[in-house]
Amino acid sequence: MALIRPFVPARDFALSRGFYEALGFSCTYAADDLAIYDLEGAGLLLQNYYERSWAENTMFQLFVHDLDEWWQRTADLPQRFGVQPPAAPVLKPWGLRVGMLWDPAGVLWHVSEAA
C-alpha cells in the first residue's frame, strides 16, 4: 500500500487546526510549526507557513466512504472558520459526485465518495 501525505499551508495555524479537526481529521503529532493529521488512512502535514499564491493554487481530492454523511460536517464551516461556503456535491461528467470546500488558507478540496 502507498499513501501520500501532502504538506498543506496555514495562514492562521490554530484556525486551520480547528478546521481540519471539525472535518474529522485526528491529530497524531503537533508542534509549533507542524501538525500531522489522519482521516481513515488519508493524511496531511499542516504547516505553520503561508504563501498566498501557493495556498490559493492548491487542490486536493479526498475520497470518503459516505459522501452524504460526511458532507454534514461542512454546514457550519463558514460561520466557525470564516471560509467560503462549500459547494454541495453534484454529479460531474466523469461520473463522480463531488463537493468542494475551501480551508482557511484558501486550499480547495474536492470531496468524493469512494467507489
Image (tube, rainbow, N blue to C red):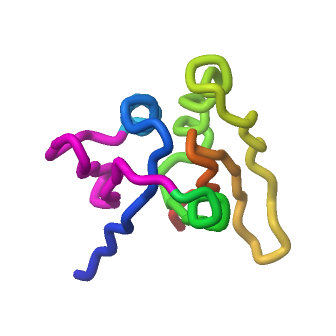
Q: Position of residue 22 (x, y in %)?
A: 43, 29
Q: Position of residue 31 (x, y in %)?
A: 16, 43
- What's the magenta region? 25-50
**What residue is rendered at 61% in x and 57% in y?**
52
Q: Position of residue 97 (x, y in %)?
A: 72, 58
Q: Quadrant of residue 59?
A: bottom right
Q: Position of residue 82 (x, y in %)?
A: 64, 26
Residue 2 in sight: yes
Residue 109 in sight: no
Q: Is residue 35 magenta?
A: yes
Q: Is residue 43 magenta?
A: yes
- Name the side, left or right, on which 87 lies relative to 26: right
**What residue is rendered at 35% in x and 48% in y?**
48
**What residue is rendered at 70% in x and 66% in y?**
96
- Name the side, left or right, on which 110 lies relative to 43: right
- Name the side, left or right, on which 30 lies relative to 4: left
Furthest toward the bottom, the residue is 2
**What residue is rendered at 45% in x and 47% in y?**
10
Q: In the picture shown, does residue 73 fall above or below 54?
A: above
Which quadrant holds the N terminus? bottom left
**What secondary structure prevails in the magenta region?**
strand
Q: Quadrant of residue 112?
A: bottom right
Which of 62/80 is in front?
80
